[in-house]
Image: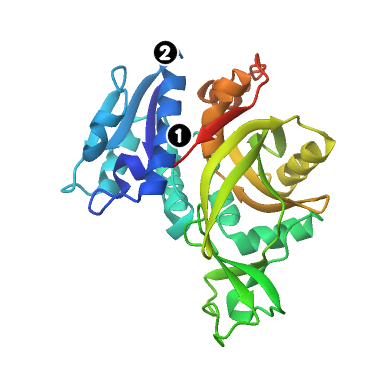
Amino acid sequence: MKILLFEYICGGGFNRQALPDSLAREGGLMLQALLADFASLPAIELTVMLDSRLLARFDTAAVQVAVVTPEQDVDAEFARLVATADAVWPIAPESGHILHKLCLAVQAQGKNLLTSPAAAVALTGDKYQTYLRLLEYHIPTVPTQLADRADCPAGEWMVKPIDGAGCGDSFVVSLPDADPQPFPRSASLIVQPHLQGDKTSLSCLFRHGKCWLLSVNLQHFNRVGRHYELSGITVNCRPVNDVYQALADQVAAAFPQLWGTAGIDLIEDGGAVLVLEINPRLTTSFTGLQAALGLNIAEQVLCLRQGLPLPVATLDRPVLLGVQ
């Protein structure tokens, strides 16, 4: 099988501008983990797109590298390489519809996506529409308003891009505020109460309304002024229990087009476990699953595609990932 692997940040998506440090670090972790997973699988011809500035950072001895330089049109290069592949695994932020457009480009050529299809990405990549779908299916979630019509009483509030990835563009506001407009009244932003509690995530595999919950992870953040920075993740921090499993199953039923790897971000506040958002793609937590559970994620996804039984975990231990 010929597989094209395109991690947007490290693969040339920023070939004509400076690389964003935090996203490049997390993207690099995911790319290196997938390269290692595929290296142990037979009968795979892997092509990986790489920004020319990052060639020395990755072990690519066993793969074909498509170098992306500042002179190239990365979209055209991606389309050209998709045409030569049997299957494509894009990893990209939801912001700016980047991941959605990549999935559409793969589907337009009739190639196999090793991720959720474009329709699932469009829905879950929109935090407000995700919130409405969660409400429809009676899934516990964080109250969410569009910023252009938000009614926010006194207290602390989180303001986020409606399609943001990561926490870099999110910020906290305290009301009442001396500023009569503490955040832009824009339909491209959402507002949520700033809840305290554990920020956990679920690493999952999805197929046609069914979910395999692999691990519960604890995300570690530092607050710097009005912003949060992700400093690390403890993968497999606690056992999967009935509460987490029920949430994962509810999400699978509410979003039946999810396929392959995806993450569910949670906030655990006062005994309640609430869904914050759904990431329809590989997430940083997945890079620790080999060490935590003995699971090869590339193998898991290929088994999903072929309808084969999924490999069983051979380990059960927490693993701390540093992302700074």
Give the percent coordinates (x, y) of residue 188: 52, 70
Nearer to the camera, 213 or 226: 226
Give the percent coordinates (x, y) of residue 189: 55, 70
Considering only vertical position in the picture, is 309 above or below 203?
above
Q: Residue at x 58, y 49 (%)?
A: 120
Q: Is residue 304 visible?
A: yes
User: Three-letter amino acid code at disc 2?
Assistant: Ala
Local crowd at mark 2 within 10 Å, few (<14), some, or many (≥20)?
Answer: few
Q: Quick check: marks 1 and 2 in contact, CB under 8 Å? A: no
User: Three-letter amino acid code at disc 1?
Assistant: Met
Residue that carries the numbered disc 2 in the rendered image: 43
Relative placement, left or right, of 223 versus 135 is left
Q: Residue at x 71, y 57 (%)?
A: 196
Give the percent coordinates (x, y) of residue 5: 38, 33
Quadrant assignment, res 176: bottom right
Give the percent coordinates (x, y) of residue 133: 71, 58
Q: Give the farthest residue toward the left.
A: 71
Residue that carries the numbered disc 1 in the rendered image: 30
Quadrant assignment, res 77: top left
Nearer to the camera, 116 or 215: 215
